[in-house]
Amino acid sequence: ESHTVISTQQIGVDILEKTQCFHGSESHIPLVSLSSEVLNQSTCVVREKNGDFCGYRVVDGLFSSEDISLLHAIVNKGLSRRKQLGGPTILDINTGYIRDIAGLENLFTTNTNNNKGDETSSIMSDVFTPEDFSHYGRIIRVLKSVVAKTFHIRAEQDLFFTAPTFITRIDESLPWKVQGIHDEYWHTHVDMNNTAHYHYSGLLYLSTYNKDFTGGRFKLYSANKNNNLQDRPGSKRSKKHQSMEEEKDLKLVLEPAAGRVVMFTSGPEHPHRVERVTSGQRIVLSFWFSCDSKREFEIFLDGKAHTAFSRKIGQAIHAKRSQQRNG
């Protein structure tokens, strides 16, 4: 079957592609994660018999170049607190956690060392300002509004920004080696299979294909009952067999461009992956929305409140470390 290619040469893209939901029950959203009231009343739940649909949308122009530049600067502010390493680095602006090939740390605390090089304490670190959090919040609110309008959801009543939501930088400007399965970012997966309360997925690109990096295109596949496209690390299938399966079911090849957004329903109808980056730095904001109000992360809506929240995280980590040292 033929597939759609959206290149960086295409300007002002706005494509909506509807697809059949891939599920075994009347509602698209898994029954185990939602109450009967939500399932019966929420506009977030996809009911194909009512005209609802699964699908994906690719759209340019939701944000100005200034919006993207400012978000990029905020991201770099966080990433710069960690020694630059090759490979994937994941930064959660909400909570300050950052993971790279060296492991997991929290940016809202800073380790201090004595003359012997031993860690002695951790102190608070204000990484992001209230203005940073406010801008980030504005970006998320726009994304929420567009996801809601695209899939006919009552945004304030039925759609909820959820965590974790994070920035991923894939850096091939430095040599690196895979340290664990978290570093193998190129495997095909289904978001809802990984995190059950993810119901709507999206990506906001902060860098551009063939300008900032090579490789790293986004690929979306059709669900296929006969093939398991959930390609987990350690799969015994040959690379040739895997490639043949994927190419047969390929639906979309997307070249990232700074400011471009792709959003899609998070279920098994949308297996997807990122090609391995071959050079440069690929940076993207991954975001998710849930139909489950209990999974809402809302503190970012107020820049000052989010700053206070980040300090509480830092204080909690500091207290835990002190207890471990003294215990």
Image (tube, rainbow, N blue to C red):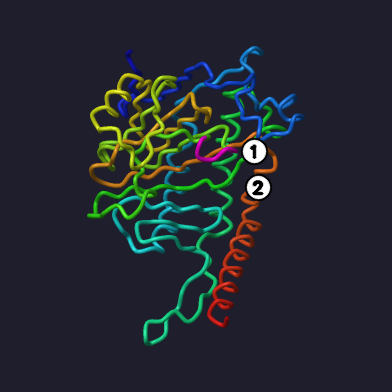
Q: Is residue 296 left or right of residue 170?
A: right
In the image, what residue type sits under mark 1? Phe
Q: Nearer the viewer, residue 213 or 98?
A: 98
Q: Which mark is residue 160?
A: 1
Other-residue count near label 2 (Cα within 10 Å), few / some / many at <14 / 14–19 / ≥20: some
281 relative to 228, above or below: below
Magenta region: which residues?
193-197
Q: Position of residue 9 (x, y in %)?
A: 30, 26
Query: What residue lies at 33% left-to-right and 42% top-to-bottom?
Result: 234
Q: Position of residue 298 (x, y in %)?
A: 65, 47
Q: Which residue does the numbered mark 2 point to in the structure image?
A: 298
Q: Nearer the viewer, residue 262 or 226?
A: 226
Residues at discs 1 and 2 in contact (Cβ within 8 Å): yes
Identify the image quadrant of the N terminus: top left
Q: Which mark is residue 238?
A: none
Q: CA distance from mark 1 to mark 2?
A: 8 Å
Identify the image quadrant of the C terminus: bottom right
297 relative to 220, above or below: below
Q: Position of residue 324 (x, y in %)?
A: 55, 76
Query: What residue lies at 48% left-to-right and 71% top-to-bottom?
Result: 110
